[in-house]
Image (cartoon, rainbow, N blue to C red):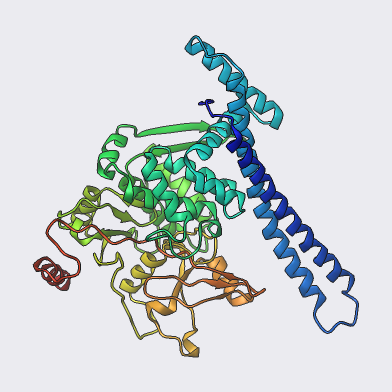
Amino acid sequence: METGAVVDAKGTAGLAGAVASLTGLVDELTGALSGSSDAADNAHGVDSHDPLRDVAESCLDGLGLVARIEAATAAVKVRLLAEYSGAAAAMEAPAESASESSARDMSVVAEVACALTIGEGAASALLQDAHAITTSLPATLKAMEAGAVSWRHAQIMVDETSSLDAAAATALEAHFLDPEAPNAARGASAGELVPGRFRRKVRAWRERHHPESLTIRHVKSVADRRMEYSPDRDGMAWVSLYMAADKACAVWNRTSALARGLQGPEEPRTLTQLRADLAAKLLLGDTGDLAGPGPSLKADVLVTVPVCSLLGATDEPGDLDNYGPIPASMARKLVAEGANSFYRVLVDPRDGAPLELGRTSYRLPESLKRWLRMRDGKCTFPGCSNHSQDNEADHLTAWERGGSTGISNLGQLCPKHHRLKHRTGWRPGPASRNEPPGWTSPRGRQYNAEQPDRAPTLWPPGCLPEEASVLEALVVDYLAVS
């Protein structure tokens, strides 16, 4: 852990500004709660407006403000940790040995752990995150102080920029936190995404723009493949595999397909339980007749490959459905060798978007279902990460009310949120060929869609994107006969 932060007037001013921002948010919350109390007092009056609606709206506003206060509080904590770390280091004479330096670091960690009543491991991680945010991620710290992103979002920024140089980290921050940046992230802002979804988007952008090729990093990481075993409570334990993404995705989809084949009226186990039981049997060699009656066991996987990368002209990463960016070599291998299990999706090199597939019948053909999976990637309900294979295609405007069966009138919904749409006041908004629908709550609050964060693909040397080329003509002919 580094503790060499400089204690100066600038740091003190930053801390004062963070506290002022927190104070302002607390004042806003006080005003919101005051309005809620006034509305509650008038609940039995004769006013023409609906006082209970006012109470409900004030509570929702208050919850939003509390979330922003928590973020601003975390920003103050980060600054306090950095200031304390720097002050503790400044009060000591230079360490005469590595062991003395390590002991001082341990002392600082222990002091913080006691002050916050947390474990030393958590305190050490907290100090490291605070150091990274205050020294390398100024935009993240500013967003936290304003209540725009949570502490969990900030931790994700720290994790995903840990191996980037200063310029790359600044570019990643600008893409997600500066709406005025060139090619800034579209759709829902960072603070509007649940942390899990935010991590996936940040990781995908990082993989595309990492200064070191994903192929090179993947080759290095393959050497770290391993199986891990972790005992747990109640006579249970975890077994996990760290392996190449294509193999891991294939294992998951194969196990899921076998489990779905066993489901039926006479099967009491859930899909989750069946996956675990089947994996155990397969690993222990007890294969038996695992399929049973049911649908085909083929596990469909979408592999999105930039066309120039597929042809070998560039080394741009592909995208594996339900995982994220994969090396170009892996994507090409999956397309070439997985014809029966993997579906190729070639994207337009001008803007990174695929072609639209439209249909006029009520039933969706498999090609349109696959395109819907690729566009949405998951259940479109805010914050839901339910995987594509478990979701249902839904007409945004009902078929019986004139809705068509085209990609712009379709959305993915998991069974739970499909029921929610039909049984409550939650309503999806419009969609397009490249963007899933946003949602409107029963209270009238708008929630933006999590749009795909695509970027124009890389062009091989000598190709001009604004002009038609021989390569483009060959690609079009190739797609027409594929």
Q: Is residue 476 left or right of residue 351?
A: left
Percent of width and height locating residue 331: 24, 52
At 29% across and 62% down in the image, what residue appears?
456
Which image quadrant is residue 283 in? Answer: top left
Furthest residue in direction front, as rendered: 9
At 76% across and 63% down in the image, what residue appears?
32
Say above or below: 138 vs 452. above
Percent of width and height locating residue 269: 53, 54
Furthest residue in direction left, as rendered: 470
Q: Is residue 363 left or right of residue 26?
A: left
Say above or below: 387 vs 225. below
Q: Please tell me which residue lies in front, 242 or 9.
A: 9
Q: Is residue 292 left or right of residue 62?
A: left
Percent of width and height locating residue 167: 37, 43
Which image quadrant is residue 301 in? Answer: bottom left
Q: Work out whether residue 421 can be spotted.
A: yes
Furthest residue in direction top, as rendered: 96
Percent of width and height locating residue 250: 33, 50
For the C terminus, the quadrant is bottom left
Q: Work out whether residue 289 can be spotted.
A: no
At 32% across and 51% down in the image, what residue appears?
208
At 16% across and 64% down in the image, what residue appears?
464
Q: Is residue 106 left or right of residue 64?
A: left
Say above or below: 189 vs 356. above
